Image (cartoon, grey):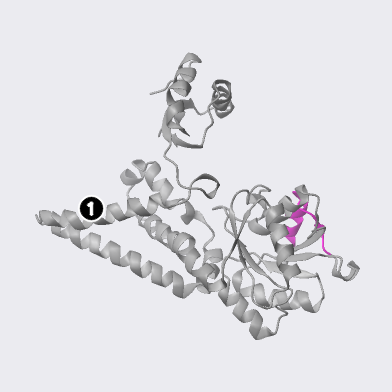
Amino acid sequence: MELRTALVVGTGLIGTSAALALRKRGVRVLLADRDQAAVRLARELGAGEDWNPGEQLAGEVDLAIIAVPPAHVASELLELQRMNAARFYTDVASVKAEPLHRATQLGCDLTSYVASHPLAGREKSGPGAARADLFLGRPWALCPTEEADAEAKATVLRLIELCGANAVEVSASEHDRAVAVVSHAPHVAASAVAARLADATDVALGLAGQGVRDVTRIAGSDPSLWLGILSGNASPVAEVLEAVAADLADAASALRALAEGDGTATNDITQLLKRGVVGHDRIPGKHGGPASSYAVVQVVIGDRPGQLARLFRVCDEVGVNVEDVRLEHAPGLPLGIAELSVQPDAVSTLAEGLRERGWEVP
């Protein structure tokens, strides 16, 4: 199915990123948003051109991509279909069952509509945070109903392909239960941990390391955006949080017992930590495949322009592929540690190459 023209309604992070990705693949993109400042910025970033409904010919737009909060998806779909804005329609909201239910209630045409959701994002929001490569290699859920036309589904699959994502077909209810486990509940959990820092002492914050940054990174996202997401998937998220809360309550009780001298309480804590390791190891690795065990090469790196470029140039020169990278800054010092994840058999080659070129490898 050819996708020549797309209409993006909602120029936030996801909508603008999809527009940028489509533009790179030669698709004509029309932009619409009730926030004129947002659509203007998206346009200036090269995401597309303004949509003028009165000037569009019937059938000119192949696909309308509805990138609005979950609570507004159905009403936006109905309005667009009444205008005959496009041949087919999808949305990219992170909740699927409730918008679909609402669309049915409103009498939307479900033959031309296929719900979808790219599993990609950033802790930043708005068109200024958008990237054309946001979806590369990421799963993109596809939730067609029985009424959906085969050509509508093929068009949405083409969208996913053009954005570089991997299509995963699931039912709307299965999707919502899944994202409750892997996205929505983790966000609430991260927020709960980050909330403890609001009243933390300066001493505690001065001791903060990479661990607490990793756990709380997603807690910096827009609360109003997340309220809409959580409200649309309330029951599945509540079930996951209740299970997490039970584990935490058991851990707290065990720690209280341990503090009072009950050495047998360590078993309960150990079991939770072991279950955590098992769960962590089940997270897919690069390109969605099985998780791989990489070795880490640590390098002292100065906080100056061009240092990362120099570091990666060495990796290229010695022929070592960097599977992942993370930076840990040294408090109060103009330097930090770059942790390069590589294949175990490449550690000595990379470490030796770095040392030969003057890098400090602990």
Residue 276: in sight, yes or no?
Answer: yes
Residue at position x 44%, y 42% in the image: 292
Residue 312 screen position, x and y as percent = 56, 27
4 over 352 or under it: above or below: below
Residue 198 visible in this rendered orientation of the protein: no
- Classify 327 as above or below 348: below
Which element carries disc 1, helix, strand or loop? helix
Residue at which label 1 appears: 270
Question: Which part of the image, by quadrant, shows the C terminus?
Answer: top left
Magenta residue check for 48: yes
Q: Residue at 45% x, 46% y: name it.
A: 291
Span shown in magenta = 35-51
Based on the picture, tell me whether residue 46 belongs to the magenta stretch.
yes
* Residue in front for this viewpoint, 78 or 145: 145
Label total for image? 1
Instruction: Identify whether 96 is placed above or below 104.
Output: above
Crowding at label 1, few (<14), some or many (≥20) Cα neighbours within 10 Å?
few
For the residue pair 49 and 208, the one nearer the viewer reads as 49
Q: Is residue 268 left or right of residue 282?
A: left
316 lies left or right of 192: right
Query: Residue 253's image quarter?
Result: bottom left
Q: Residue at x 75, y 77 (%)?
A: 79
* Disc 1 residue type (three-letter): Thr
Residue 306, image x, y percentages: 59, 26
Query: Is residue 9 rendered to the left or right of residue 240?
Result: right
Point out residue 91 in the picture as x, y percentages from the top left corner: 67, 67
Query: What x and y, as percent, mark residue 1?
Result: 78, 60
